[in-house]
Image: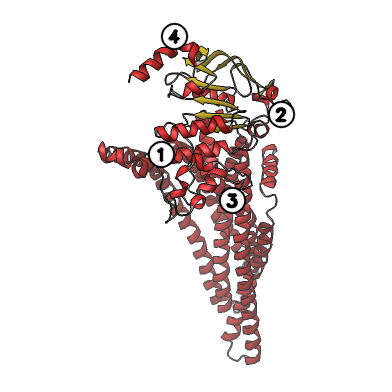
Amino acid sequence: MTEKICNLIVIKKILKGTKYIYISAMLLLLISICSPVVSYIYKILVDEMSRKSFSYSRMLVIVLVYLLVQIIVEIIENIQNHIQMLGELNLKDNVAHQVNEKLGKIKIDLFEDVEKYNLIERISNKLIDEIINTMDIFFVIASPIISIFTSAIILFSVEWYFPFVLIISNIPYFFILLSQNKKYYSQYKSINTLDRYLKYWIDALLNRKYAKDIRVFNLVEYLEKKIKKLQCEIFNIEYLFDKKKNILNILVSIVRNLSVGVCLGLVFYLIEIDENVTMGTFVLVYSIVHEIVNSLSVTISQLAEIENLSLYLNDWKKFMKLEEECDNIFPEDNNVEQKMRICFNNVTFSYPGQNKDTIHDLNLKIDYGEKVAIVGKNGSGKSTLINLLLGFYKVKEGKILVGGKDVCICKPEEYKQYLSCMFQDYIKFQLSIKENIFLDNEKIEYTNLNEIVDFIKDLPNGLETVLGQLDKDGEELSGGQWQKIAFARACVKSKAEIFIFDEPTANMDCVSEKRVINFLFRNLEEKTLIFTTHNLELCKFCDRIIVMDNGEIVENDSFCNLMEKKGTYYDMYRSQTIL
């Protein structure tokens, strides 16, 4: 009982602001009341026509009433369909907004947890549609119930036991549907991971980014085998479920149709022995019996779906309870140097599900305005260090302080407004260059963009040029050009005081690299700049170089001092320059 009350509270939150759904439900109730009335008027019409002598004026009145009621019902049905469409759109927007809002607050490290990631993926890919469909049913169900009630009253007037025969014959159908829905939900969870792998391999085969590799290494047959194997596994699971479902549905259908046959056979018998039972009665019973059977079928399937909703609401409740990033406000401080000072104090971190520490007992201080390069071999912990500074993950031990405030307990939007980052795997929006750089903040004014995005002058529409292949007139850029756009996007963030660049010039030519670095050190001279890079020449421009190995800082000094020490950095630099 407590769970059902909790589910009702959840449903109320989901339905908040969805007024069209309620209007649609009221119109469906009106239609369900009118439908049996139409059948009864039709019965009167048939009885009148069956008489040896009938009044044409009475016939005309009955026909006009029948047509009028039928027209009214059809008008209401069309209005209801339109309002239902608006209601579904309204509900979908409402649910999607709640999901997207939650996704924006979930701690990033939860995406590393397989079970929680599966839950997030179910919510994103399936649950929105399932909740919308079931919530739609929740309101529609009143219509067939009222239709059954009004039809049963009419049928009761013919023979009292007719409604009971029809209702009892449909009870097995209800329990079968309940069982099927639970099995379907269980089946969906079991194929969730398989389906993700399938989508991955299909994307690998069809994605144009991989087309060259696929042809060079002749991977089509290899990928097809992967896809075929997963498709067979998913098909086998779904086939067994559908086979059992279809057998049970056939048995239920036989029982239901036998009950209809019993009712109609009894009406034929009554016509023979009772003069008061007319052909109009048979037409009425035929119409009402099918109305009841259809309404029962709809009602039972909807009741089963509503019961099934509790399974999906459990996922919804788990999703809404996922841990969010902290809400503590980042402190306002007029002393920017103090506010933006970075301190890593004895920080240890390991990714979820891994026993080995990626960062171990790390200590580091970066003053405001410093230009720092972080270098090291692959897997040394450079990118992890940046992710921790950005507040994406919670440290296992120690603290990361910015301006004396622990970043793990700061409100994300308050803290991150002071940071800007260009990631190595930056996003490429299929939008205009202007939208790619400024996103939704068109108020930003930046006059020196041409120094970075120097290829704009060669494009037909300049900043308004649409990129990618979604648009028929879209321009395709090189890797270096896309990187310049990502670079510009990071630089124009208005409130940022700390700028982080992860391999910022990896795809650029020597001339572009020099121009971009000069731009940075000239235009962001007072800001804190942090680079992670394998380009050791870039480190010459920095105040300090931090050398990492196996999650620890092994060297931390200026370029000149490190070269004099002839330690790890010296060896790395020599190896790169000799090559």
| Sequence order check, earlier mark of 1 and 4 | 1
Q: CA distance from mark 3 to mark 1?
A: 41 Å
Q: Which circle, 3 or 4, is nearer the viewer?
A: 4
Residue 567: which disc? Answer: 4
**In the visual, does 229 lie left or right of 312?**
left
Which residue position is annotated with label 3?
A: 132
Q: CA distance from mark 2 to mark 1?
A: 39 Å
Which residue position is annotated with label 1?
A: 479
**In the visual, does 552 lie left or right of 369?**
left
Q: Amino acid at mark 1?
A: Gly
Q: Secondary structure at mark 3?
A: helix
Q: CA distance from mark 3 to mark 4?
A: 62 Å
| CB under 8 Å between discs 3 and 1 | no
| Sequence order check, earlier mark of 3 and 4 | 3
Q: Dot 1 surroundings within 10 Å: few (below 14), some, or many (20 or more)? A: few
- Residue 530: image x %, image y %? 55, 25
